[in-house]
Amino acid sequence: MSERVAASTSLTKSLSAELHPIIPGFHPDPTICRVGDDYYLAHSSFEYFPGAPIFHSRDLVTWSQIGNILTRRSQFRAGTSGPSTGIYGSTLRHRDGRFWFITTNVSDFESGQLIVHATDPAGPWSDPVFVPEAIGIDPDLCWDDDDACYLTWHVLDFTVGGQGIRQAPIDLETGRLLEPHYAVWQGSGMPMAEGPHLYRIGDYWYIMLAEGGTERGHCVTIARGPSPRGPFESCSLNPVFTHRSSSHPVQNVGHADLVQTPDGGWAAVYLGARPRGSTPGFHVLGRETFLAGVDWVDGWPVFDEARFEIPDKPSGFVEHFIGADLDPRWVAAGSEPDAVVERAPEGGLRFRRWGSAADVLCTRVADFAWQADAIVERSGTVGLRLDDRHWCGVIFENDRAQAIVQIGDIRQRVGAVEITGDTATLRVSTTPPQTAPVPFGYAGPDDVVLSVVRDGEAIEIARLDGRYFSTEVAAGFTGRMLALGAPSRDGRVVSVTYQPLPD
């Protein structure tokens, strides 16, 4: 069981969607569809299981997680594990009473694209159909006027690299391609043309791509033609959306998906990153999901980033772990939550596994400045995880709380305090950096502070440079996670409280 806690700002305050994500924290590669007045939004999730978180909204700006699409290992085979493996870019669509979701599981790469369907987007979703003839990433599904379904994807392997955008009609029930795949529009000429989505809008079929890589050169490009097969005419204004070579506080924008509103208007969801700190800038929350309005001018989309205002929704929560089911926010890296934790009869969680950086229960961090307090009994851990080689935490065991940090291959104890009794409150928090920016200091994106709370007072054990828990240092495609664990079988996490702090 979980409950919300008050945010540090008023619920009535509105924020510009140009600068603030609709789904904050590590929620990249958004894909959206609308059914009546209801919108549904799904994301890539990489090594974390359950995979592909899915959200619901009726206004495009206020979203609630309704579950995860891939909740069984038959849907998300473990295969090759590790940071930034697992579930990549996807497409979510609705057709004839069914929701369809197609994605790539890089951990089971040679099986090809996987397709699941459901009548209720909250699940359960079907067992997967695989498409072994389509090896690569970022699959898309669209249907023409004759109800033929087309699969379009980015052909890629991890030896040669990207090999272009391909397409073929497909039988969704079997995963069989109905003819040999063929090339379609390959983009405007920038590297890494990927993330295709196709739409029938007016008299044209449009194909929209992500180009330039998912870093600072990321862009949205588009072309149009008479059918899903093309031939396609590239927009002379490409890229139609980018923040490259700008000082905009949201960078890396791209991988967009379009949706039509009930009144006939248009909007787009897209990913972006919010780097902070000194050059080259460090993004720590992962790639987040943003929203823009879209106008059609001379038959081409024009993005209006400032059209929407979003509510300043509370991100804090208190979790007591009471009840049979975990909140869908909780995931495990390279494992399953039920394999990592079990409910303690007296409440809270015990850990079935311990001793590894992967033996933790995680939830996505949604704020730049935040703190999380975990009340633990006998032993327990609370920490910040970017991947299994970039993490830190406070570990309570044997009457002592220790601060441990791992950066790459180096693991170090950086401080400890004695604890009296069997229960401790462990804290991890982030604060603005205490040093000057480059060249007079290091001025990373923030400081990560590891503490224990005793008699209501926080006792700082360690203060760490937040650069080491950023994508620019660690690489990969994920973001920071709040992680819970225990160093021994008899440890229990009684509760955890997460709350944003003034930034």
Image (cartoon, rainbow, N blue to C red):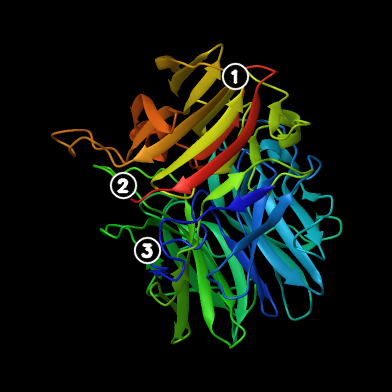
Q: Residues under labels 2 and 3: Cα distance? A: 13 Å
* Mark 2 in CB contact with mark 3 (< 8 angstroms): no
Q: In this view, does 76 lie above or below 221?
A: above
Q: What is the residue that sits farthest to the top in this orientation?
A: 398
Q: Which of 118 and 241 is in front in this view?
A: 118
Q: What is the residue that sits farthest to the left in this orientation?
A: 440
Q: Residues within 10 Å of mark 2 (few under 14, many from 20)?
A: some
Amino acid under label 3? Answer: Leu
Residue 150 shown left or right of residue 154 in the figure: right
Residue, x 51% and y 42% (percent of image)?
Answer: 478
Q: Mark 2 points at which residue?
A: 276
Q: Is mark 1 on a helix, strand or loop?
A: loop
- Percent x, y of residue 419: 49, 17
Q: Mark 3 points at which residue?
A: 19
Amino acid under label 1? Answer: Asp
- Percent x, y of residue 485: 61, 27
Earlier sequence position, callout 2 versus callout 1: 2
Q: Nearer the viewer, residue 257 or 22?
A: 22
Question: Toward which corner of the image does residue 239 lie, by quadrant?
Answer: bottom left
Q: What is the residue that sits farthest to the front in this orientation?
A: 455
Residue, x 67% and y 36% (percent of image)?
Answer: 107
Q: Is mark 2 on a helix, strand or loop?
A: loop
Q: Name the residue under label 1.
A: 422
Earlier sequence position, callout 2 versus callout 3: 3
